[in-house]
Structure formats: C-alpha cells, structure tokens
Image (cartoon, coloured by chain):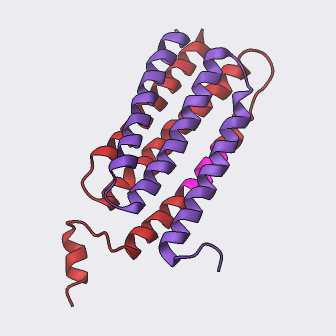
C-alpha cells in the first residue's frame, strides 16, 4: 500500500517540479523567477524524502537538509539584491 | 497495518498540496497572487511528507525524529523568505490589477 501511494506521490511531485520550471523560464519579472527557484528547492526536498522512503534509506536526509539551507540562503540573497541592489551593505 | 495507513495518507496529502502550490505558482495572474501558492501550500505539503518519513522509520524499530529538524527549519524560514520576496515585489511596484493598490497610488 505504501509503494502504491508513493508511486502516485512521486508522479505528482514531478508534475509540480515541471510547473515550477515552467514559471522559472517564462516568469515575466525577476521576482517570479526567484519565487520559482524557491518552490523548486522545496519540491526537491519533497522528492528526496519520498525517494528515501521508497528505497528505505536515510542517506538522503543530509542532502535534503543541505538543499533546505542553501535554498533559503539563495532566496534571501537574491531578494536583498533585488531590494537594495547590494547584498552586504 | 495502522502505520501503513497513516504513512500512505500523509504521503498522498502532502503530494497533493505540493502539486496545488506549484499549480498556483504557474496559473495565477499577478505576482502577489502567485506568492500565496508555494509559500503556504507547498510548505504544508512538504511538512506532511517529512512527517510521513518520520512515522515510517519510527515504525521499523527505533525512534527516528531527524526529519523533524528539516520540518522545523522549513516552517521557520518560509515566512521570512516570503516576506523578503514580497518586499522585492513592492520595490518593483508589481501591483497587478488590484483596485486598492490603484487607489493608494492615485495621488
């Protein structure tokens, strides 16, 4: 039962990543692209954790933690750059 | 058996909300509407999937709570990044077709 629902969930998450990538390439403004990158990192965390349940391994946990931290730092740096034109003042 | 039911329910719930957030990001018309999708729905969805992983590995012997670390980190940082992106959007003056926005900018 877990494997059936995991298969459905993996398909849904991959579709979600495709939609975020569509907004990343199309996005009319730069802020839209930053938002799409942030969403893409969150979807990547979901995909890694679901694959960790599928293969019954906990090695993916460190990769998911790294993606979470780096995604947040990237979003903060890009937003600060868009607001002030500078990252560290 | 009961653990399988809980894990399957949490996984399907989380994947549905992740898809819903990205659908909102792709389909809504203006930037401030698009900001609502991923920053709330996707955070709930990924939190649910992380909870499912914690329950699954706890049911196989030994308490496993290190997924909760990512969950707490995401739930703390999602509002901060949403606030910063909203301020960047305000700086770019991306009001969209919002009547209240037009009214405040008339004078």
* Residue positioned most to the right: B62
Residue B29 placement: quadrant: bottom left
Residue B64, placed above or below residue A74 = above
Could you say which is closer to the camera, residue A47 or residue B4?
A47
Judge left or right: residue B31 versus residue A52: left
Q: What colour do you see for chain A?
A: purple
Is A37 magenta? The answer is no
Residue B94, image x and y in percent?
31, 69
Judge left or right: residue A15 versus residue B106: right
Is B73 magenta? The answer is yes
* Residue positioned most to the front: A25
Q: Residue at x 69, y 41 (%)?
A: A65
Q: Residue at x 27, y 50 (%)?
A: B28
Residue A56, image x and y in percent?
69, 16
Judge left or right: residue A24 versus residue B97: right
Residue B39, image x and y in percent?
46, 51
Q: What colour do you see for chain B?
A: red
Q: Which residues are magenta?
A: B71-78
Could you say which is closer to the camera, residue A21 or residue B57?
A21
């Amino acid at each position: 039962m877990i494997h059936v629902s995991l298969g459905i969930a993996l398909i849904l998450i991959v579709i979600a990543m495709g939609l975020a990538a569509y907004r990343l390439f199309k996005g009319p403004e730069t802020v839209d692209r930053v938002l799409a990158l942030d969403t893409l990192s969150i979807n990547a965390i979901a995909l890694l954790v679901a694959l960790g349940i599928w293969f019954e391994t906990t090695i993916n946990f460190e990769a998911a933690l790294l993606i979470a931290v780096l995604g947040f730092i990237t979003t903060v740096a890009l937003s600060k750059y868009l607001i002030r034109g500078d990252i560290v003042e | 058996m009961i653990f399988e039911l809980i894990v399957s329910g949490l996984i399907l719930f989380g994947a549905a909300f992740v898809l819903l957030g990205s659908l909102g990001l792709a389909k809504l018309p203006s930037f401030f509407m698009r900001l609502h999708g991923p920053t709330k729905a996707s955070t709930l969805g990924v939190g649910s999937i992380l909870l499912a992983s914690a329950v699954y590995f706890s049911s196989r012997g030994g308490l496993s709570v290190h997924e909760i670390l990512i969950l707490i980190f995401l739930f703390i940082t999602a509002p901060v990044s949403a606030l910063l992106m909203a301020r960047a959007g305000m700086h770019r003056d991306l009001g969209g077709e919002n009547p209240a926005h037009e009214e405040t900018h008339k004078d």
